[in-house]
Amino acid sequence: MNILGYFQKVGRALMVPVAVLPAAAILMGIGYWIDPAGWGGDSALAAFLIKAGAAVIDNMSVLFAVGVAYGMSKDKDGAAALSGLVGFLVVTTLLSPGAVAQIQGIDPSLVPSAFSKINNQFVGILVGIISAELYNKFSSVELHSALAFFSGRRLVPIVVSVVMIVVSFILMAIWPVIFSGLQHFGETISGMGEVGAGIYAFFNRLLIPIGLHHALNSVFWFDVAGINDIPNFLSGQSGIDAGTAIIGKTGMYQAGFFPIMMFGLPGAALAIYRAAKPANKAKVASIMLAASLASFFTGVTEPLEFSFMFAAPLLYVIHAVLTGVSVFIAASMGWMAGFGFSAGLVDMALSSQNPLAVKWYMLIVQGVAFFAIYYFVFLTVIRRLDLKTPGREDDAENVSNITGSQDAGELATQYVAALGGIANLEVIDACITRLRLTLKDRSVINEAELKNLGAMGVVKLGENNLQVIIGTQAESIATRMKAIK
């Protein structure tokens, strides 16, 4: 597997622990609605809900270790997740300040402050990756009959615990340097203030086609480089001990996405519909409406973005620039809101009573403006440059040719056939909106048939990796594809 493919694998695995955030957002959001002024201090029910959500937020480090280990394992087995937990406990225990002082024989006051921050998402991700690789290597090992009980998956936690002792001693020497570098990076980006937030948002969109935006998001949204924007917002913290967050601006790496996902992209969808050929308008309308509703209510944007990402790359670059501008404006104006899943209406409503939500309603005003901007810019560019957005293709590529079944099981069978048969599929996986596949021979796939089945885009990576963007059915279709013999 090439480097890009491996980073994609890591990015895909990061979605496993991130998927638990909506639970925290719902619990804490309802809690703040019940008691917006007292933060749970004036209501036992609010305190109960807020603390329940905080149980997730406060343990994101170990969730990353468990989730990444599970997500990167070859067969998604619980033993891999257990190994990630074991590895994380070994590392964080051996590298706790008290343990470091005892092992090195020094006064606890002389232990570098970096070790007081060893329980963080960066270490969780690192442990998860190592644990997954050890699981993939040792989960099929058969020991001598006398030790047969410890063969296979039972062997992995034992191996992980031993390897993590070695990893801990290595980190004991280099963790202060790594922590200093991460902290410096976080301080540099945060020091750029609103401009840094805008730059991040621009690259967030640009990396979506290759699926590496999840890795970028972990830097800004979690405690990898000291920014930790989502947990800080959900838990009502205005900054962090390292001082890398700008007081009053917690949520600045999230807020500006609401105008884009709730309003901007639906404006683009309307422009694509208006620019479609008359004969195709009805079909384009149904596709754009479904994608717009997903974007507006839940913040799931990929079905809409992939409808023009490859057909009209210029429009996608414009979209990335406008996203950066939106995040910059929201951060500059101090209009703050946050999310546990994505920047849709549901998360906006849940976060509106968060103690750190500041003039969140102005994001709606900003969104109306961006709806108009997206609509007129997209419509003008499409028509003047005659871009082949949905509904404007040549007859042979007409959007009305979609023939995929509505049943997930039948559709899975059809996708497998278009991908060269089940024997051609080495790895079948999925994230929120895309199938992530490793093929034996990518040349045998029928790309036209994939699009006829409803795929909004096909992304080729390396020599044998393929992503098929099919919308929110991706997970269920992937599950059914795995069951095909």
Image (cartoon, rainbow, N blue to C red):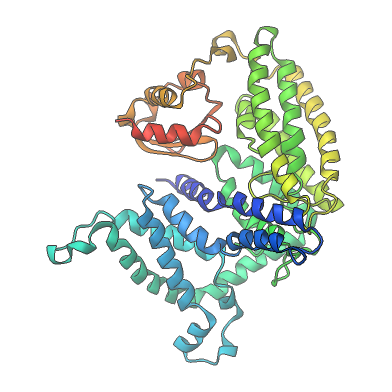
What residue is at 20 percent from the left and 62 percent from the top?
149
| Residue in the image at 58% along x and 59% along y | 56
Q: For this rendering, which residue is in front, 145 or 115?
A: 145
Coordinates of residue 284 in the picture (x, y in percent): 65, 17
Compared across the picture, whether 164 is left or right of 296 comes to left
Expressed as whole percent of the image width and height from the top left, the position of residue 335 reads: 83, 50
- The quarter of the image holding the N terminus is top left
Residue 158 drawn at (x, y percent)? 31, 67
Q: Position of residue 361 (x, y in %)?
A: 84, 45
**In the rendered image, is residue 322 in sight?**
no
Q: Residue furthest front?
A: 44
Horizontal side of 116 relative to 248 (left or right) equals: left
**Where 307 falls versus 63 (above or below)?**
above
- Which residue in the rendered view is the most extreme toward the left? 145
Above or below residue 150? Residue 286 is above
Say how many tags the image has: 0
The vertical placement of 246 against 310, above or below, is: below
Residue 93 seen from this side: yes
Instruction: Indicate the quadrant where residue 263 lies.
Output: top right
Q: Quadrant of the C terminus?
A: top left
Quadrant of residue 296 in the image? top right
